Image: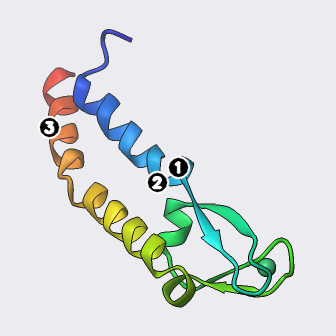
Amino acid sequence: MASLPGGLDYDLRMVDTCKVMKEPLRCFGCGSRQYETISRIAQGGAVTCVECVSEINLERDNSAVFASALSFVKSVRETPKHLSLGFHRGSQI
Ligand SMILES: [Zn+2]
């Protein structure tokens, strides 16, 4: 593992975070909470409540969670790690 450049390790962890980290969504139909990944929340739209099968609207009913998920994904994508990663790989081979 020591041969892995630090940039590569960091980049993979950031990408995984969006798909692994979960935030609680509140269902206004039954009041229960369920967890969705940040990556899913940032897509927007609606998810189905596992308890009462009604739609949980991300933008309207969970605007705070939606906004934070969106800005998190945005900040990950805006990090120009992919460019430097390519250069590192090219120069090492
Ligand atoms: Zn519900």
Name the residue tied to disc 2: 18
Image position of 88 with respect to 73: above or below? above
Q: Which residue lies furthest to the bottom in this view?
A: 60
Coordinates of residue 85 in the picture (x, y in percent): 22, 38
Q: Which of the 4 image quadrants contains residue 92?
A: top left
* The C terminus: image quadrant: top left
Label ID, residue 63 = none
Q: Which residue is drawn at 21% across and 40% down?
A: 86
Q: Percent position (x, y) of residue 74?
A: 30, 65
Q: Judge depth for marks 3 and 1 and give the one in front.
A: 1
- Circles 3, 2 touching at the beta carbon (< 8 Å): no
Q: What residue appears at the point 50 percent right and 62 percent down from the top-left corner?
A: 39
Q: Is residue 90 left or right of residue 9?
A: left
* Residue picked out by circle 3: 87
Which residue is drawn at the image coordinates 25% and 22% (left, top)?
5
Q: In the picture provided, is 48 more to the left or to the right than 66?
A: right
The answer to whether mark 2 is within 8 Å of ligand 1 is no
Q: Identify the mark at residue 21; answer none if there is no mark.
A: 1
* Residue type, numbered disc 3: Phe
Q: What element carries label 2?
A: helix
